[in-house]
Image (spheres, rainbow, N blue to C red):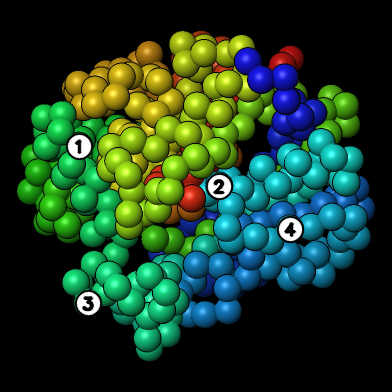
Amino acid sequence: MSTRAGETLAAISGIGMSEVARPSQKSALTLTVDACLQAIEDAGLDRSRIDGISTYPGIIPDRSGLSEVGVHDIRMALGLQTDWYSGAKETAGQLGAVFNAIAAIAAGFASHVLVFRTITEASARKAQPGATAIGGGAARVGGVHEWTTPFRALSAANWFALYAQRHFHEYGTRPEQMAQIALNARRNAALNPAALYREPLDMAQYMASRMISTPLRLYDCDAPVDASVAVVVSRVEEARNLRNPLIRVEAVGSALHSRDTWYRPQDLTRCADAADMMWSRTSLKPRDVDVAQLYDGFSIHTMLWLEALGFCARGESGPFIEGGQRIALDGELPLNTSGGQLSAGRLHGLGFLHEACVQLWKRGDLRQVKGDPRVAVASAGYGGGFAGCMLVARHD
């Protein structure tokens, strides 16, 4: 185990979430203010005590809806006097903003850092059908997309369908197995009043849904929404005296050792550097995890995270989730208990940490996992240069 455990100096002290809509009648700034004020109130803090602010990916002034609100928008809207702030795009996935906040806490730059993620892709797509983050809402694409667009690889669904197809080919994974990620998400979303899609979904409906990019079907793809999520990351000694039971950060994973990118990965079926790093920084093991909130931009993401994090062997996520019993609310590894991005809505990463805290603080109501959950893992992103995970634990 690594002795470099600066993250254990940090804790999650409060969480907040705006309405989740498709689309919302509220502006991106209003959604963000709603989520941030909730998180600050939930922690039992006054705004004057927030001395840091962090977001991913920082403001992107285009029409894609990917990120319309930056740190200074919220700093001024809430009247915050910050000693530290960060809004960075090139991080270890969407949880990178949380990792930056943890680092600021460990370095002594701040005591209470407000972290938020706001996305308004639903409104963007209504205003401009077909608008995506790839094109940035502009008339022309740029960067690597200049090379993928001529081949009609216009969506992340096209790119990650290759991951799924390779997994099917390499390990014999079947559509009926991958379907369990979507079916489990919908069962959980039915118990979540804030979820976007709550109506029943069965295997027949899943199999009959249209193919988006083989082998990914409609229900394998997340649902763009308008929403904002916020958390407050606090110094542990400060968090002990706040409103909620202590949820300490046990370990984070942000490593990238290969030259992998989304488009030129060395191995389409493995991206475990971040997971390996996380487990190296704690004495906890996969068997100690009570609930898992794993990225599901597409169903294949969640399967690959299950393997990377050691909940099953490489190539065995299909058999592991087959039938859905293991990953159900009353299973051995309750998974994506809010409904995830497939059914609750695409909160773009930070929603998984929010739901981990909901479960550890036992606020899940009808979707609350059984027993006394104390350890949760959250992950966001997938693929080289865009993956991060973290382990959090409640200490009463």
The kind of residue tagged 2 is Ala
Element class at badge 2? loop
- Quadrant of the frame with the C terminus: top right
Query: Foreground mark, 4 or 1?
Result: 1
Q: What residue is rendered at 57% in x and 58% in y?
A: 90
89 relative to 205, above or below = below
Looking at marks 1 and 3 on the same chain, the residue that comes earlier in the sequence is marked by 3
Q: Residue 219 in the image: x percent, y percent?
A: 23, 48
The quadrant in which residue 123 appears is bottom left
Element class at badge 3? helix
The alpha-carbon separation of the residues under discs 2 and 1 comes to: 24 Å
Tell me the tag on residue 86. 4
Q: Which residue is mark 1?
A: 167
- In the image, 343 versus 255, the foreground residue is 255
Looking at marks 4 and 1 on the same chain, the residue that comes earlier in the sequence is marked by 4
Marks counted in the figure total 4
Element class at badge 4? strand
The quadrant in which residue 294 appears is top left
The alpha-carbon separation of the residues under discs 4 and 1 comes to: 37 Å
